[in-house]
């Protein structure tokens, strides 16, 4: 268990044509000991590069990395006491599962002479060390239910089993930091859900520092203590999952997190306490001057089809409905918006709706998010009485 | 791959072409076998017979094995070809790994040099190598037979291409697991590249077993001669124009390679086509 501190990390790649590309830009990040931190971002945002820099597999162009309070710049990966799980699992295909799991221990516990082919096993102390290795391998294999697979080769395993072997190989030498680079993205949906739970349980049991890279917001939201959302080589926002969802710092974060995606529509500040959106006037106060254009973010679940019209109710025309089982997604058009909005409601409420039907949509005002023209979140003031929650 | 069935005239035409070319390739070989069991009088008789009228095989093979030190030649061949193959592998694999997976300045230029080495024929280098061997006193020894071939640009190229196909993540995982760079070559890359390595070893052993050119330059002592050279001197010195024993000797020299091929035919073809990696 160790903390990680990244201080103004920069990474510049040189393209084949000679022009530099800045992948990471003065990135500073602290990970507490024992924390589960997720780096979340779209592909190409630099999250994988960052985790490779922490592991020491790639040198940073500037800045410094500390693990457990010690600067590890220039240290070889094997001296950093970190273990990594790769997206491709990166198991050694020519070795059995047992040999795959034993290799990190063989390299650390046996001397070069004891590792030598043929003669190694006759070196003094070999058998004693080898027994400790076998014991630890069996223990880890038992913990991850791999004992019956120890004699197999990776090629004979299913995706989920390979994933567990990769996890076990990372666990076996009890590193102080676990790094995981999109470990679940090659699994099917059902297995992914299961492995998510297993990794969370693993973290709870080991209490080791985890840094987890993913582009999948569900993984980030369900597993992490904190999530760092990355765009273009910077951390846009960092915080607990609930905070990122409820109070995104920027429009990009709001749009990246949440399924279906948040509805972003233009609104105009009409007075100190009202904003006009798609024909409706919402009683939301801002500090912006009258006439300013704002982006109003409406989460799909903050919109509800209602019977009655009203000042804070939008008028929508149904485009299509997706039934997800318990929930339904209703896509609809509102006045003055080219793109369809989406709301999420119970299947019962959506039952009465048909495509092309005109209906009323109420908004939960306390869930409305406002962003200025640069995409930064701005504070809003919502009168408690007017909250649409009372409609339900 | 499915086999398309052809209309019968096309099939006949195709097989005729294949049979004729195969026969052309095999004819000298068959002729060699046939001559190796014929007596001296029969060889120059006009008219063509594949099988001998009188079987002289025993005499010919006995002469081949006793008149010249043929077993010694074969042993030399094993020693020289084996040393060359092992040394080539020991040097090529790390070079190929560096060129495939390590980042350093001048990597492209180095690889260009390897490619250059690939297109220079052995004969061009014979004279410089002869001088080097002479200066270092290596001529007329096993070392003299081996040293020009210890570094093989072909081996470096072949293995480099194969190593490039191995994902970087495996190298990264090995580094995190504490494996040194040379350890990665021998513990991870080489076992994964086994088909390429076997293919390379086949090429290496076959070409040096059959090599006549360099041994002709480097060696004078009969006791050091590899098989191909041995056969040539055998013709001059012992057999004269006695072609029966000569052909018998040739058969004995070729036999080990042919036998090895027949025994491991499937494995060889798999390796040469570099299939079944994953």
Image (cartoon, coloured by chain):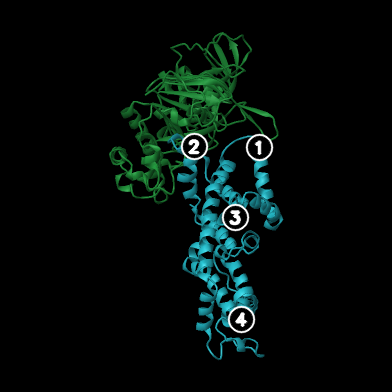
Q: Are marks 3 and 1 on the same chain?
A: yes
Position of A213 relative to B160 (above/below): above
* Mark 2 or 3, nearer chain start: 3
Element marked by disc 3: helix
Q: Is residue A353 above or below residue B3?
A: above
Residue hosting label 4? B242
Q: Which residue is rendered at x = 62% and y = 10% of the image?
A: A290
Circles 2 and 1 in contact, beta carbons < 8 Å: no
Determine whether label 3 and label 1 are within 8 Å by CB. Answer: no
Of circles 4 and 2, the one toward us is 4
Callout 2 secondary element = helix
Which lettered chain is shown in cyan? B
Task: Estimate how packed mark 2 is, as few (under 14), some (14 to 19) or many (20 or more) residues with alpha carbons within 10 Å.
Answer: many
Say yes or no: labels 2 and 1 on the same chain: yes
Label placed on residue A75: none
Q: What is the secondary structure assignment of the residue under circle 4? A: loop
Whichever of callouts 3 and 1 sits on the residue coming sooner in the sequence is: 1
The numbered mark, 4 or 1, whose residue comes first in the sequence reads 1
Q: Secondary structure at mark 1?
A: loop
Q: Nearer the viewer, mark 2 or mark 3?
A: 3
Residue B172, numbered circle: 2
Report in which chain the residue with disc 4 lies.
B
Q: CA distance from mark 2 to mark 3?
A: 41 Å
Task: Please give the residue where the numbered disc 3 appears in the rendered image.
Answer: B144
Q: Please give the residue where the numbered disc 1 appears in the rendered image.
A: B106
- Image quarter for residue B47? bottom right
Query: Where residue B227 sits: x, y (%)?
Result: 56, 67
Q: Position of residue A279 (x, y in %)?
A: 58, 21
- Chain A is which colour? green
Measure how far apart labels 4 and 1 are at the Cα level. 58 Å
The reply to whether callout 4 and callout 1 are in contact (CB within 8 Å) is no
Number of dots carrying numbers: 4
């Amino acid at each position: 268990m160790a903390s990680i501190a990244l201080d103004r990390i920069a990474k510049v790649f040189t393209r084949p044509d000679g022009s530099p590309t800045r992948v990471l830009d003065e990135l500073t990040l602290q990970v507490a000991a024992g924390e589960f931190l997720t780096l979340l971002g779209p592909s190409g945002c630099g999250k994988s590069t960052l985790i490779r820099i922490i592991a020491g597999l790639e040198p940073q162009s500037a800045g410094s990395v500390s693990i457990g309070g010690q600067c590890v710049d220039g240290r070889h990966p094997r001296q950093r006491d970190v273990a990594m799980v790769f997206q491709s699992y990166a198991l050694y295909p020519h070795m059995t599962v047992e040999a795959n799991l034993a290799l990190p221990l063989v390299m650390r516990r046996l001397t070069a002479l004891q590792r030598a082919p043929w003669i190694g096993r006759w070196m003094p102390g070999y058998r004693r060390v080898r027994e400790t290795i076998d014991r630890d391998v069996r223990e880890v294999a038992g913990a991850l239910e791999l004992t019956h697979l120890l004699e197999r080769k990776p090629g004979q395993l299913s995706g989920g089993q390979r994933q567990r072997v990769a996890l076990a190989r990372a666990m076996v030498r009890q590193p102080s930091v676990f790094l995981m680079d999109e470990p679940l993205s090659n699994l099917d949906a059902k297995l992914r859900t299961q492995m998510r739970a297993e990794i969370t349980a693993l973290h709870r049991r080991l209490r080791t520092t985890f840094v987890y890279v993913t582009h999948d917001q569900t993984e980030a939201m369900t597993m992490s203590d904190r999530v760092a959302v990355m765009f273009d080589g910077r951390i846009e926002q960092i915080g607990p999952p609930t905070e990122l969802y409820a109070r995104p710092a920027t429009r990009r974060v709001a749009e990246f997190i949440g399924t279906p995606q948040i509805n972003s529509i233009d609104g105009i500040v009409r007075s100190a306490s009202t904003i006009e959106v798609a024909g409706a006037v919402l009683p939301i106060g801002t500090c912006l001057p009258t006439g300013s254009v704002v982006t109003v973010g409406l989460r799909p679940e903050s919109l509800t089809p209602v019977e009655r019209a009203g000042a804070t109710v939008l008028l929508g025309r149904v485009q299509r409905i997706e039934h997800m089982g318990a929930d339904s997604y209703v896509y609809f058009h509102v006045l003055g918006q080219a793109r369809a909005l989406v709301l999420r409601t119970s299947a019962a409420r959506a039952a009465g709706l048909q495509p092309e039907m005109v209906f009323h949509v109420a908004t939960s005002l306390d869930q409305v998010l406002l962003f200025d023209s640069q995409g930064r979140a701005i504070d809003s003031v919502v009168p408690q009485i007017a909250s649409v929650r009372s409609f339900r | 791959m499915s086999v398309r069935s052809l209309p019968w005239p096309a099939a006949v035409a195709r097989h005729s072409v294949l049979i004729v070319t195969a026969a052309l390739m095999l004819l000298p070989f068959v002729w060699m076998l046939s001559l190796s069991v014929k007596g001296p009088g029969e060889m120059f008789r006009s008219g063509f017979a594949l099988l001998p009228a009188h079987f002289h095989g025993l005499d010919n093979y006995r002469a081949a094995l006793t008149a010249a030190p043929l077993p010694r030649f074969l042993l030399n061949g094993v020693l020289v070809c084996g040393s060359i193959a092992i040394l080539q592998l020991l040097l090529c694999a790390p070079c190929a790994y560096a060129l495939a997976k390590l980042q350093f300045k001048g990597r492209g230029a180095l690889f260009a040099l390897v490619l250059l080495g690939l297109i220079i024929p052995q004969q061009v280098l014979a004279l410089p190598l002869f001088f080097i061997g002479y200066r270092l006193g290596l001529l007329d020894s096993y070392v003299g037979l081996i040293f020009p071939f210890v570094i093989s640009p072909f081996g470096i190229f072949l293995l480099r291409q194969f190593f490039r196909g191995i994902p970087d993540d495996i190298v990264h995982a090995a580094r995190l697991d504490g494996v040194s760079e040379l350890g990665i070559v021998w513990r991870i890359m080489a076992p994964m590249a086994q088909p390429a390595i076997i293919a390379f070893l086949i090429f290496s052993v076959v070409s040096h077993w059959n090599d006549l050119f360099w041994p002709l330059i480097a060696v004078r002592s009969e006791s050091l001669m590899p098989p191909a050279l041995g056969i040539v001197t055998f013709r001059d010195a012992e057999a004269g124009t006695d072609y029966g024993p000569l052909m018998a000797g040739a058969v004995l020299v070729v036999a080990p390679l042919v036998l090895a091929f027949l025994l491991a035919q499937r494995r060889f073809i798999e390796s040469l086509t570099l299939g079944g990696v994953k």
